[in-house]
Amino acid sequence: MSLPHAILTALLEKPSSGLELTRRFDRSIGFFWSATHQQIYRELGRLETAGLIRALPQDAPVRGQKKEYEVLPAGRVELERWTAGGDEPKAVREPLLLRLRAAAVVGTTGLDAELARHLALRRAQLADYREIERRDFPPSGTPADDRAADGDRLRHAVLRAGIGLETFWVEWLTETRAALPADPS
Amino acid sequence: MSLPHAILTALLEKPSSGLELTRRFDRSIGFFWSATHQQIYRELGRLETAGLIRALPQDAPVRGQKKEYEVLPAGRVELERWTAGGDEPKAVREPLLLRLRAAAVVGTTGLDAELARHLALRRAQLADYREIERRDFPPSGTPADDRAADGDRLRHAVLRAGIGLETFWVEWLTETRAALPADPS
DNA sequence: AGGTACATGTAACATGTTACATGATTCC
DNA sequence: GGAATCATGTAACATGTTACATGTACCT
């Protein structure tokens, strides 16, 4: 039940069309919640039906033509309600670890190549995050007003989570490759 | 498409009934791939139909009575095929980070309590992993035969991934709580 | 006979994925 | 007018979740 709230958050940050949302889910929002354009259009329809968002006025909506949405008061209330609540840390589902466990039983053929591939991807993602941090969160210097600073602190914390996770994976992948038995091919 | 392979791996490690698998998915296997008993029974049925596993002989299978499965040769081949392959690191979906991002827009009410709750859970999980490591992977001393040692190295690497991830979250949660604005209640 | 733990399952629904369909706009 | 891009959507399917149903074994 998180996708609708991800969309509400995104639309509060900035009213957008389905495709614009899709692009934002490929960048910043996607760093902690991914979604395809099909999911987004389906969910936009539901949120509109539920009266939580509405399409901005336009003359005669036509298929193929941009349609922007904004959050209605009821939508903001729902997001506040959800944000104040909680849930269990969701169970881990990491296929790479599953592969390792399987390899412990049926052999490590191809495993090192897969680890190398993941390492390259994680390094690229980490560099990407670091670049965003450099650009969007320069090392203090500008004490903005309190409310804006609070929001910034939270967004920075989210980004640091991404950086920390990628950093961990890069280290773990490097260690694990080093400890791997020579390829038995 | 990972659940069937998780089950094949588990059954190769040790033939089991549905309920036994469910319990193992709540412990060791669940550390990197979770599943409920309903998913497991459904998937066992599919794997049996597909000829990858079979129920161990028993006289007249009855509902309510234990039914053990073992992996057939075709199942091992399928697992080998899957293990040698690869896939993209799956997209992140972390509701807690989404909540932070939402809180940056609608306010931080209740957020610190939620972070504190996660911190306690992560610490408990970390202690659990450390205990398992202490018990199952004592600091060397016993150079077992090569094949067993290879499997152990891989299983240990999986466990270290769990330990590293929980360690990261404990640190991040601690830092983030410290940086949080005082509760605006 | 009643309760509890063990054990296997069904049904309904929610969410996520993959493949495809359709129209609008812009540039050549 | 054809190709590329923007933009919205449908359909079918796979996977995951929640609630419930049923039977066995054992203990009291």
Image (cartoon, coloured by chain):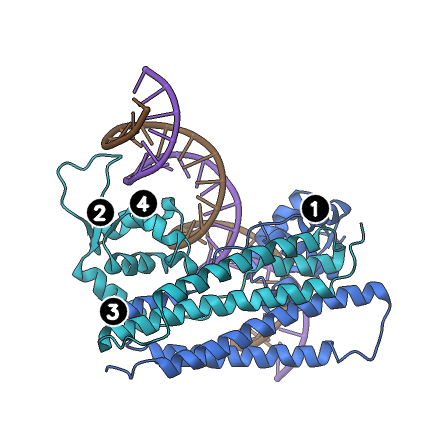
Chain colours: A blue, B cyan, C purple, D brown
Side (left or right) of A37 relative to D26: right
What residue is shown with label 2?
B68
- Of all residues, the one furthest to the right in this rendering is A145
Count neighbours of disc 4 (C-alpha within 10 A) and say few if under 14, some if 14 to 19, many if 20 or more.
some
Q: Are marks 3 and 4 on the same chain?
A: no
Q: Secondary structure at mark 4?
A: helix
Image quarter of the N terminus of chain B = bottom left
Residue type at tag 1: Arg
**Considering only order in the chain, which callout, 2 or 4, is on the residue closer to the N terminus?**
4
Q: CA distance from mark 3 to mark 4?
A: 24 Å
Whether pointer 3 and pointer 2 mark residues with C-beta atoms closer than 8 Å, the reply is no
**Considering only order in the chain, which callout, 1 or 3, is on the residue closer to the N terminus?**
1
Q: CA distance from mark 1 to mark 2?
A: 46 Å
Q: CA distance from mark 3 to mark 1?
A: 48 Å
Q: Secondary structure at mark 3?
A: helix
Q: Name the spot of residue B82 as percent of width and height, x first.
A: 30, 67
Q: CA distance from mark 3 to mark 2?
A: 21 Å
Q: CA distance from mark 1 to mark 4?
A: 37 Å
What residue is shown with label 1?
A81
Task: Please give the name of the residue rendered at 50% of the width and 62% of the height, measured from the top-left corner.
Answer: B126
Q: Name the spot of residue A121 as percent of width and height, x first.
A: 49, 78
Count neighbours of disc 2 (C-alpha within 10 A) and say few if under 14, some if 14 to 19, many if 20 or more.
some
What residue is shown with label 3?
A106
Residue type at tag 2: Glu
Q: Are marks 1 and 2 on the same chain?
A: no
Q: Note whether residue A93 is visible.
A: no
Q: Name the spot of residue B33 as percent of width and height, x first.
A: 41, 58
What residue is shown with label 4?
B19
Chain holding disc 2:
B
Side (left or right) of A133 relative to A38: right
Q: CA distance from mark 4 to mark 2?
A: 10 Å
Count neighbours of disc 3 (C-alpha within 10 A) and say few if under 14, some if 14 to 19, many if 20 or more.
some
